[in-house]
Amino acid sequence: MPVVATVAAGVIGVGAGAWPTVRGSTSGDEGPSVRTQLTGALADQQWAKPKPGSWTPPKPAPDGLPPVIRSIGTQDKVVFLTIDDGYEYDPEFVDLVRKERVPIMTFLTSQYVKGQGQYFWALRNAGSQMENHTVQHLNMAMQPPEKQKKEICDASDTIAKQYGRRPQIFRPPFGSMNESTRKMAKECGIKSILMWSAEFYNGTSGPGVGFNGFARGDGSGKNFRPGDIVLMHYRKGLAEQFKMILGWIRQQGFRPAAVENYLPKSLGGNAPDQPAPGQTAGVP
């Protein structure tokens, strides 16, 4: 079946409450043509927004460059699930995200999505925002500024062409960055750099926590805290690993939330920007 017809059928299925089978291998150029024809049908998921006064929006950096965000200040027992890379494709994971209605944010390394456009289109429609994780997953701090710029800008170009939205949030591979990274990211249209406060070593072993272990970045135990940004990766068996962390989150009385709803628009999110001191909201 032609790719356009396959995805069109999938769109009809979504509208009827069904979901198409996600194939593990496709041609790599279907995203742009499908986006052109089906933009109106492929609407983004809508996730619950935080109540006014329940969280402190991250602030812009004083130097005008994208700020580095490691957690969200909130009173709500919410955590934010973010998944990096994209070189493993677990179709069951897409269905799980859709059925459980769990907001996630994907940081795509654009070289990994070649030949898997339909898989990530399905994830996009299940509710995952697609953001920037470079082209080749290089250590940014080890690269000259122009190489950093090419890695970030080219990845944004590919993701925008494939999924209809240019990334505004960046995550450096390995969490490695320097001042040049922030400068080059801004030149590529990036508004904020989202790091993490805890990591689930799904499908691998973490230092001191073993296989499928969980660790806080500050070494302060294994419990979640309100506003935690959790790092995961696209690895084999992701669906079962995702069920595992969802169980932990719920056991501790937390719930996953959409991090983009806790970021102001000026930082690449959906929340209203806060007025500057002395200003009234909506008045320049």
Image: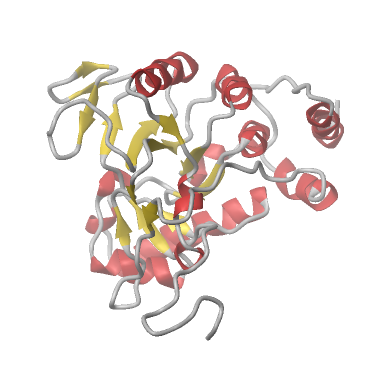
**Residue 242 placement (x, y as % from top left):** 44, 21
Task: Identify which residue, 230 or 6, lies in the foreground.
Answer: 230
Task: Identify which residue, 195 or 33, lies in the foreground.
Answer: 195
* Residue depicted at x 37% and y 31%: 232
Q: Quadrant of residue 11?
A: top right
**Residue 194 placement (x, y as % from top left):** 36, 52
The reply, left or right, for residue 223 in relation to residue 228 is left
Q: Quadrant of residue 204?
A: top left
Does residue 18 sit above or below 35 in this rendering?
Answer: above
Task: Identify which residue, 26 or 252, lies in the foreground.
Answer: 252
**Residue 66 placement (x, y as % from top left):** 36, 67
* Residue depicted at x 82% and y 26%: 13
Task: Identify which residue, 139 or 233, lies in the foreground.
Answer: 233
Does residue 282 sit above or below 284 in this rendering?
Answer: above
- Number of numbered discs visible in the structure rendering: 0
* Residue depicted at x 72% and y 19%: 21
Colour mapping used in the image: secondary structure
The reply, left or right, for residue 127 in relation to residue 68 is right
Q: Quadrant of residue 127?
A: top right
